[in-house]
Image (spheres, rainbow, N blue to C red):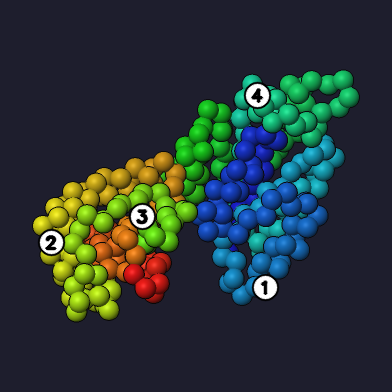
Amino acid sequence: MEFLIISGMSGAGKSLTADILEDMDYYCVDNMPVALLPRFAELCRAAGGKYERVALVTDVREGESLSDLLNTLDGLWSTGVEYRILFVEADVQTIVRRYKSSRRRHPLMRPGESIEDAIRRETAVLEPVRERADYIINTTGLTTAALQSRISSVLTGSKKHSLAVTVTAFGYKYGLPMDADLVFDVRFLPNPYYVEELRPLSGLDAPVYDFVLGSDGAKRFMELLEPMLKFLLPLYSEEGKYTLNIAVGCTGGRHRSVAVARAVESALKRAGADVTLSCRDIDKGG
């Protein structure tokens, strides 16, 4: 079991880090009380492999709880729980700006104390945890995409992550897919609906597929679309996307869109993409 403890400065991005790790298939728990760490680790180990990658955020809100955290971490090692610590920090100006933007109060602020004073006091309190950290990420100036890349780099040694692509065939008469990132309208292609022997079939059937993809328009369309998608996919991945939804639409979502979506799926698989085909409206009558 991979057990990752996320700690660090308030306002530095611990919760966002947990969100990113969740997208990387970690089971994440935010704001875990220190006292519950051993029991939580025990439950994860007893789950029989259900939780292979676990990440949890734990905060040190007061100075006296620091010793509790350090003692608890020592206790985890003694029971055979191997863990790594990811420490998240940012400079004082960045954290001040984030708190002012969110209008939230720093958790360690005392009456009459400035945010800067609370941040500097927290920095001193957390120094022993920082010294134990396996990884330290400074989020100053990082966009979400850059933070994703940094986390992937420090944990896996690679800045790349897999992009899961879904190709959805749909009918415009039933509405656009709400989660579509890219939409392609193929209503310009010859319509098998008007060919009597093809009408009962769908784009999953070879006669319809050959009819649609055999047209000059479809051939040229795929010649242009395939290299464009190969160009776009790594850029979307670098920008931090984990999923990409490509929608292909015709009138009813049964013939042309399904045939072209299949061709797009095949093209993406040739490019090594992790792709799934969905034919949303294929059974709605065309």
Q: Are marks 2 and 3 in contact (CB under 8 Å)?
A: no
Instruction: Judge the density around disc 1: few (<14), some (14-19), many (≥20) Cα neighbours within 10 Å.
Output: few
Residue designated by label 2: 215
Q: Visible in this render: residue 224?
A: yes
Residue designated by label 3: 246
Position of 200 with respect to 106 (left or right) is left
Q: Nearer the viewer, mark 2 or mark 1?
A: 2
- Tell which of 237 and 260 is nearer to you: 260
- Mark carried by residue 46: 1
Q: Is residue 128 above or below residue 82?
A: above
Earlier residue among tags 2 and 3: 2
Q: SS class of the residue under badge 2? A: loop
How far apart are the two marked residues, 3 and 1, measured between alpha carbons? 40 Å
Tell me where residue 73 appears, x and y as whole percent.
Answer: 72, 52
Q: Quadrant of residue 134?
A: top right
Badge 2 amino acid: Ser
Q: Quadrant of residue 283?
A: bottom left
Q: Is residue 130 above or below residue 253?
A: above
- Mark carried by residue 34: none
Earlier residue among tags 3 and 1: 1
Q: Are marks 4 and 1 in contact (CB under 8 Å)?
A: no
Q: Visible in this render: residue 85?
A: no
How far apart are the two marked residues, 4 and 3, measured between alpha carbons? 38 Å
| Residue at x 27%, y 68% (from the top left corner) | 255
Earlier residue among tags 2 and 1: 1
Q: Nearer the viewer, mark 4 or mark 1?
A: 4
